[in-house]
Image (cartoon, rainbow, N blue to C red):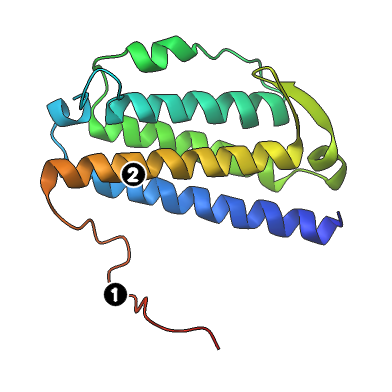
Amino acid sequence: MSEILSKELTHECVLVMKENVKRIGICLAELRYDEIWQRPNSQLSSIGNLILHLCGNIGQYVLSSLGGKPDQRKRDEEFAATGGYTADELLARITDTVDRAATVMSQLSEAELLRKRMVQGFNLSGVGIVVHVTEHLSYHTAQIALHTKLLKEKDLGFYAGLNLNITNE
């Protein structure tokens, strides 16, 4: 992997992550406090839980593993919470976490992106970690959007103003 390719990979992943935070913010703006903490059923997490979970995951994978901070994640608490954070507080937490992760990711050298390390019991390269957190954030953002659409019965306008019918040249 070249240094140019390394920078392009982390740059594109950061863009996707920040776009997902924007989408989470759109969802949170639509929801009341009780809806944020509502579990659709016993097998599903609330939107609040998913956001806490994303902060924990990104913290463990990027801030700790790639950034050298101590791993202080308490994963079970992410899913056990039944409230305690407003929409604004949750958005501030995920925004701050992704911003700090973006800083770490943008400073990674080619060697650090290729180096293997153990995270949450998995042996991953820096590339594997960057791809994991990007995919994981996208996956849960889609769950948050679906839950919001089910509660509010409305289009969230993620692609408002864009012509998505343009074909490739």
Read off the residue under disc 1.
161
Between the residue at mark 1 and the residue at mark 2, the CA separation in whole angstroms equals 19 Å
Q: Residues within 10 Å of mark 1 (few under 14, many from 20)?
A: few
Q: Identify the residue at image location x=34%, y=75%.
A: 162
Specify the amino acid type for callout 2.
Answer: Ile
Q: Identify the residue at image location x=27%, y=69%.
A: 160
- Quadrant position of residue 126: top right
Q: Looking at the image, is 99 positioned above or below residue 11?
A: above
- Asked whether residue 85 appears in the rendered view, the answer is yes
Residue 141 vs residue 104: left or right? Answer: left
Q: Identify the residue at image location x=49%, y=11%.
A: 74
Query: Does the residue at mark 1 contact the one at mark 2 (Cβ under 8 Å)?
Result: no
Q: Residues within 10 Å of mark 2 (few under 14, many from 20)?
A: many
Q: Secondary structure at mark 2?
A: helix
Mark 1 and mark 2 lie on one chain; the one further toward the N terminus is 2
- Quadrant position of residue 76: top left
Work out whether residue 80 or residue 19 is closer to the camera in this orientation and state it. Answer: 80
Q: Identify the residue at image location x=77%, y=53%.
A: 6
Tell me where residue 124 appears, x and y as whole percent: 74, 31
Question: Which quadrant is home to the C terminus?
Answer: bottom right
In the picture, the disc for residue 24 is 2
Residue 123 vs residue 93: left or right? Answer: right
- Asked whether residue 67 appears in the rendered view, the answer is no
Question: Which quadrant is home to the N terminus?
Answer: bottom right
Tell me where residue 16 appears, x and y as whole percent: 51, 53
Q: Looking at the image, is 110 positioned above or below residue 35?
A: below
Specify the amino acid type for callout 1.
Answer: Gly
